[in-house]
Image: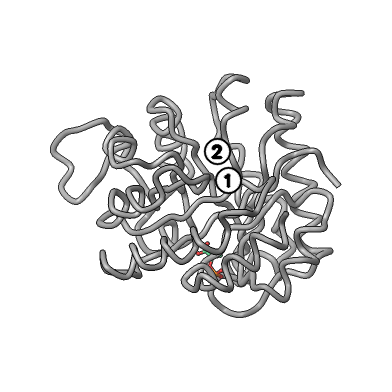
Amino acid sequence: MSQRKKFVAGNWKMHTTLAEGRELARAIRAEVENVEGVRIAVIPPFTSVAAVAEVLRGSRIEVGGQDLHWEEKGAFTGEVSAPMLRDAGATVVLVGHSERRQYFGETDESANRKVRAALAAGLSPVLCVGETLDERDAGRTLDVVGRQVRGGLAGLSSAELARVCIAYEPVWAIGTGRTATPEQAQEVHAAVRAILRELGGDVTEAIPILYGGSVKPDNAPALLALSDVDGALVGGASLEASSFSAIVRAAA
Ligand code: PEP
């Protein structure tokens, strides 16, 4: 078992009105208030970041954004910047989620700019990587994930690398109810860990590598027990306080 503190983050995606977001945050706070030794974050849609941060003020639960623009401000209609997320109370931000890559043209280059912008603003970026089913079937998983990790982290100093998180999320497992087997997850996590060491040496030992893709209370214990799995990025199961908190407890 690794020495890294486990990190469980809930990606609410495009769910929750303000009232629903506040209610979910309150319920999660009540359920995980006493769980020690796990870093916890909830990641609501932009409209609810400030309200959820307010509900969670004084707790150990962090709030994050689901994406960001790399510029601080400017004529970029529809975008939100890293300083704006900080200002709203976020400490974490997802970068390069597969839904951004699939539907909104995110590339390794744009992800890299976003990682840098997040770091510059003092946010903890969670760089999401993962292969499609076709890529896995073609035996290209490690190539694809390796390219995404190297591309997303290109040019970072060791000090910057130490502040990054990675989420390995096989695209075929996101929202599908299919989960990577522990062997599949462990293989990719170990490969990512090796790339991180190559990129930044010892400082990268602190980087948590989360697994994401249909993590539920019943499969979380086996995944979180793997030596190179340092936590979970949870989508669907993070929309219910009981299932999200069960996953947090499995990480504790
Ligand atoms: C995600 O959106 O990052 C995710 C892993 O979703 P789900 O848990 O629903 O597969």
> Taking 132 as reference, is 8 above or below it?
above
Q: Position of residue 35 (x, y in %)?
A: 65, 54
Q: Where is residue 129 shown, x and y percent of the image?
A: 58, 52
Foreground of the two, 163 or 184: 163
Q: Are marks 1 and 2 in contact (CB under 8 Å)?
A: yes
Report which residue position mark 1 lands on: 148
Residue under the point 62% across and 27% down: 162
The residue carrying pointer 2 sits among few (fewer than 14), some (14 to 19) or many (20 or more) residues within 10 Å by Cα, namely: some
The Cα–Cα distance between marks 1 and 2, rounded to whole angstroms, is 5 Å
State the residue in front, 237 or 102. 237
Does the Cβ of the disc 1 residue fall within 8 Å of ligand 1? Answer: no
Q: Is residue 187 above or below residue 114?
A: below
* Pointer 2 residue: 151
- Ligand 1's quadrant: bottom right
- Horizontal and vertical percent position of residue 159: 59, 19
Residue found at x 80% / y 38%: 3
Q: Quadrant of residue 158?
A: top right
Quarter in which the C terminus is drawn:
bottom right
Compared with residue 2, is residue 155 higher up or lower down, i.e. above or below? above
Q: Residues within 10 Å of mark 1 (few under 14, many from 20)?
A: many
Q: Tell me where residue 48 sits by quadrant.
A: bottom left
Locate residue 72 relative to residue 67 in the image: left or right. left
Residue 114 at what x, y percent from top left?
A: 40, 37
In which quarter of the view is residue 14 placed? bottom left
